[in-house]
Amino acid sequence: MKLQDKVQTIKGVGEKKSALLKNLKVETIDDLLHLYPRKYEDRREVISIMEAPFGKDVLVKGVVTSKQMWSRNNKKVPLKIAIQDNSAKLEVLFFNGKFLSNLFVVGNEYTFYGKINLNNGKRQMSHPEFHRTGDPDDVRGIFPVYPLTEGLTQSYMRKLQMAVLDLADESEEWIDDEIVKKYNLCSPAYALKKIHFPEDERQIKESRYRMVFEELLTLQTGLFYIKEGIREINKGVYVDENISVQDFISRLPYQLTDGQNRVWGEIQRDLAKPTPMNRLVQGDVGSGKTVVAELAMYKTVKAEYQAAMMAPTELLAKQHYASLKRDFEPLGVTVDLLCSSMKAKEKREVLERLANGQTQILVGTHAIIQPDVIFSKLGLVITDEQHRFGVDQRTLLADKGTNPNILVMTATPIPRTLAVILYGDLDISIIDTMPPGRKPIKTHLRNEDARTAIYNFVQAQVKEGRQAYVVAPLIEESETLDVRSAAELYEELTAQYPDVRIGLVHGAMKQEEKDSVMEAFVEGKIDVLVSTVVIEVGIDVSNATVMVIENCERFGLAQLHQLRGRVGRGRHQSHCILVCGHESKIANMRNEIMCKSEDGFVIAEEDLKLRGPGEIFGTRQHGLPELNISDLVKHVDILEDVKAVAAEILRKDPQLKETSNVVLRQRVKKMFGENIQLRL
């Protein structure tokens, strides 16, 4: 057998088993060896039955004192075995036990691995793994636990791995000797053998470290390769650095913050390069990303190109349109809006103005990536709230021009480590300062007992001329979940506060209905907006000073922070009230973080620690290759090391064509698939 042979070449693996293995992305023997254990069971130390903790996997041994079956005719009858060591008795149950009965002999000693529970005062273990004590294939040792699919067992997977383990010796070293020595990497053959069948913790650490290092090196090399490939093959839209935007800046009613000035400097340098800009601007809610985007648009327009801005919702697109029109019309720049709800005649007129170059800036929703939208000379593409768009949608908009500059904005703080991975094709800028004079939002944690006081406070704020949000996790009442629903809250508040104008908005409503209610709130015709998370992004009401989040334990940290960011946008003191319905360890940790910090990046880091990247971001949407063994949170130190290694490899060999990089090139192609077809 060879590493590249199909798994069917392994004795006992037929069509049925190979189909099941394919579900685990295992088609070759090499794939099998790289199907790593997700954890290990330490079965080295036998514990006495009396000392064994309940509910945890333990290794015990004892002499069989009796065995009993309730029926000898039924194949699926339970088998009950009594065993005893020097400390206590244990009852072992096998529910389909007819064929197991002959394996146990009264008076012989056996070793068992499983969970002990207390049942009617008796210690009991159900369906443990077992062997006669002293047998060659005893259950003692460190045992790998693999990801499975229905139809495969741990025992079967271990036998398969053992059958091909010697082929690990075919895995030759493919990482440069200097790197191996500098980072103290074990050999790939040793790593493959010991990651599956280690003898101690040290071997687990050594082998996993090697595999994490090489997987992250492959990932980072691919990301750098894509980014440099985009720059190398594309000649971008050039915007002369000497074009002044001072007339725009001088009209602003405030001074740009240090963070805005720094990011604007980075964007200006990008625009003046011969290759396209691909930049992500991260900034917390209210940090002033839109002004930086306006500067980029204005400079692009002055260079006689068009700019496009795509927003995830019609309401947000209309808000951007209103602010851009207000800021640009006095400077003679024409701005148009394109949304799917517009009448056919309106759309047609916008498309005509766009195609003949009359429209200099177009703002819209997904409508602007439709085939009939044709730009005269597109030079800059901006997507707002990028996490709401897939990579494909960003590409469709960019394809409206010839390698236009791309600026991506998000108010959803992403830890820098994760941003580098998720947006591997983009340079990253962070606006880390807030405009002066903004009052911190006061965050309060309350329970159900404080409900009346909370809504009396909301009513008092409304009487002072302010507005409020009340956010619920569900649209309607649930029979299975004990949480407050938006519809329930709306009815309750409407009945309790007849003098307060209350609106309701949720995701099940038609877009026109949602926009109508939200616009009424923006215009001050609604005092309290009861909502689900549809208002998380895309509504800016400076007069709103209270955010009440019902059943806050149902929301993630990032969501809570985004919801809180809907208030605190005006000159009045704002409050966020977290109403906790059911306490838990995780919920309490989230609430504590929310009450302590307003820094979105700090909150994002904590969210990442609590939930991990897999829960926060769908890998498919962001185009992130699936990782088999690496954890972007746990292995951040290794990630930093491999970034330097990958950068140096590509500096010396930009196309990975040297013999020493052949294996790395193959691994990158396998990991990224079609996404890596840039210069090959």
Image: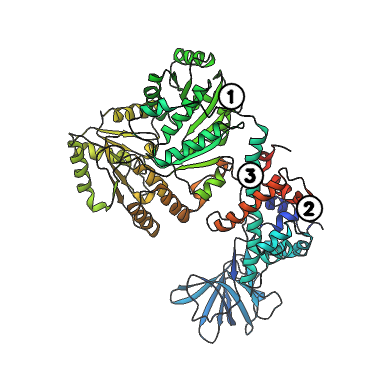
| Left/right of residue 238 with respect to residue 191 in the rendered view | left
Label 1 or label 3, whichever comes before in sequence order: 3
Q: Quadrant of residue 400?
A: top right
Q: Which residue is mark 2?
A: 4
Q: Which residue is mark 1?
A: 401
Q: Quadrant of residue 377?
A: top right
Q: Position of residue 184 (x, y in %)?
A: 66, 65
Q: Residue furthest bottom?
A: 86
| Left/right of residue 237 with respect to residue 302 in the rendered view | right
**Of the pair 285 and 528, the residue shown nearer to us:** 285
Secondary structure of residue under mark 1: loop
Label 2 or label 1, whichever comes before in sequence order: 2
Inter-mark Cα distance, 3 to 2: 28 Å
Q: Position of residue 130 (x, y in %)?
A: 62, 73
Secondary structure of residue under mark 3: helix
Q: Mark 2: few, some, or many residues within 10 Å (few <14, many ≥20)? A: few
Q: Is residue 47 visible?
A: yes
| Numbered label attached to residue 224 | 3
**Of the pair 56 and 648, the residue shown nearer to us:** 648
Q: Mark 1: few, some, or many residues within 10 Å (few <14, many ≥20)? A: some
| Left/right of residue 670 with respect to residue 391 in the rendered view | right
Q: Is residue 556 visible?
A: no
Inter-mark Cα distance, 2 to 1: 44 Å
- Answer above or below: position of 543 versus 38: above
Looking at the image, which residue is at 77% across and 52% down?
660
- Looking at the rendered structure, the kind of residue marked 2 is Gln
